[in-house]
Amino acid sequence: MAKGNGLKYSIDLSFEEIKLPPFQEILILGKNSQHGKIGISKSFDMLVPNGFELVEVGHPLVEAVFVNKRILSKMPKEKIIDILDDKVFPFVSEGELLKVDFRVTISYSNIEQEF
């Protein structure tokens, strides 16, 4: 382009650090996903060895759920799947990968001890 033709550029730029895998708590794998549970399992084994547990579910929309093992140290997987089945699975589309933010807070109340 020739000089002086009035050409200007306007650029907006932003960036942020990402972590791998790009989710931290739970990943839901919809039925007939192109990624497949075996492929995702192998990817996780390379990125975060022994970091996630594969939970196969018998749901018409969901093939499997990958749960961070830190969460499993706080809650039984059956309870996690029950919550997801009630609150999240109805919204999963066929072939979809769904990231779920699932934070567990543990609290106690009215603790009594004798000294």
Image: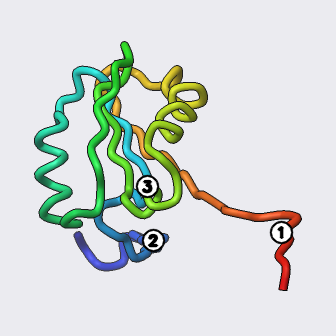
Q: Residue at x 53, y 31 (%)?
A: 82
Given residues 17 and 98, the one toward you in this image is: 98
Instruction: Give SS at disc 2.
Output: loop
Tell me which amino acid carries mark 3: Leu
Viewer-side label of 2, 1: 1
Residue position marked by numbered label 1 in the rendering: 111
Give the mark nearest the N terminus, 3 or 1.
3
* Residue 98: x %, y % from top left: 41, 39
Tell me which amino acid carries mark 2: Ile
Instruction: Give SS at disc 1.
Output: loop
Residue position marked by numbered label 2 in the rendering: 11
* Residue 7: x %, y % from top left: 39, 69
Tell me which amino acid carries mark 1: Ile
Instruction: Give the spatial CA distance, label 3 vs label 2.
Output: 44 Å
Given residues 1 and 55, the one toward you in this image is: 55
* Mark 2 crowdedness (10 Å alpha carbons): few <14, some 14-19, many ≥20: few
Horizontally, residue 15 falls left or right of residue 52, namely right
Instruction: Give SS at disc 3.
Output: helix
Q: Residue at x 42, y 64 (%)?
A: 70
